[in-house]
Amino acid sequence: MFMTDRILVVEDEPDALELIEFNLEAAGFRVFTATDGPGGLQRVRDGGISLVILDVMLPGMDGFEVCKVLRRSPATSQIPIIMLTARAEEIDRVLGFELGADDYLTKPFSPRELVLRVRGLLRRLHPPDPAEAQVLTFGDLVIDPSRHEVKIHGNRIELTATEFRLLQLLAQRRGRVQSRDALLQEVWGYEKVIDTRTVDTHMRRLREKLGNSADRLETVRGTGYRFRDE
Ligand code: CA
């Protein structure tokens, strides 16, 4: 049986909520809504939600806090989150180290753009190719796809699903430059070229988490990124 993906939209502005709901339903998704932070959090905890669209400015508990709480709990940590922000200055915080959202959109955004991102992030939830389950070892750095685990000197590094996929993909294609567009396509599932700082911000966060092993992640100016395997 085909199960329709269930999207939760957490937004307190009625017009914005209605617009998003309308467009997602038109795209074939089943949509649930919440109009404040605690309500959104509760709805995710109730289960069955495939992806969350989370506004930053919310009554009760803001989107940053909701995102952080969802990421902290094993039951909800893997659910893709797209955050909506009214201000460009908030983007770094949205994608920030402690929050771990998968992507963001700055208001006003085109509903079509939102639908493309939702589709992309859901597409990648599908079970990975068994050939990709191979453990990758680079000195002290161990990437284990079947356990979804990264270890450095035996210590487990906590990565979000997106960070993990980004690292895994670069490591699998070590030595070869991966463009931002290619990474957006394969890590985020985006089919169209989307103008976003998502890749760079995630990369920065991934490097922070990897500490000394971050040396392996090279920036290739004007092109993208490469995993160095000496
Ligand atoms: Ca709002």
Image (cartoon, rainbow, N blue to C red):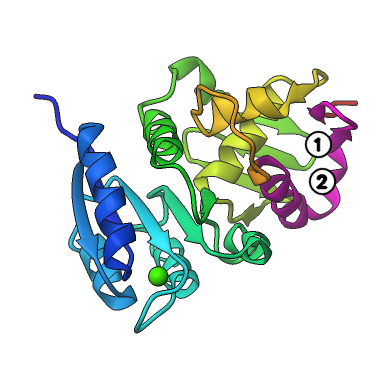
Viewed as shown, does residue 40 lie left or right of 230? left
Image height check: is 45 above or below 59?
above
* Label 2 packing within 10 angstroms: few (<14), some (14-19), many (20+): some
Using residue 63 as the reference point, say whether residue 177 is left or right of it. right
Q: Nearer the viewer, residue 183 or 215?
A: 183
Q: Position of residue 54 (x, y in %)?
A: 40, 60
Q: Which quarter of the image is occupied by the N terminus? A: top left
User: Does residue 88 appear to the left or right of 72 in the view shown?
Assistant: right
Which class describes the residues within 10 Å of circle 1: few (<14), some (14-19), or many (20+)?
few
Element assignment for label 1: loop
Please name the residue that numbered disc 1 is placed on. Answer: 139
Residue 127 on image: x %, y %: 36, 26
Q: Report the front residue among 151 and 171.
A: 171
Please name the residue shown 38% across and 28% down the image.
Answer: 123
Q: Is mark 2 within 8 Å of ligand 1?
A: no
Label 1 is placed on what type of residue?
A: Gly
Asked whether the residues under the numbered discs 2 and 1 touch, taking CB atoms below 8 Å apart as contact, a structural biologist would say: yes
Residue 211 in magenta? yes
Percent position of residue 105, x then y: 52, 51
Position of the C terminus, as image quadrant, is top right
Q: Which residues are magenta?
A: 199-226
Q: Which residue occupies the extreme left position in the image?
A: 1
Q: Identify the residue position indicated by label 2 in the image.
A: 213
User: Magenta stretch: residue 126 in it?
Assistant: no
Using the rendered image of the protein, determine whether residue 149 is visible from the camera's viewpoint: no
Helix, strand or loop at disc 2? helix
Tell me what residue is drawn at x 36 percent, y 81 percent.
Answer: 59
**Number of numbered markers:** 2
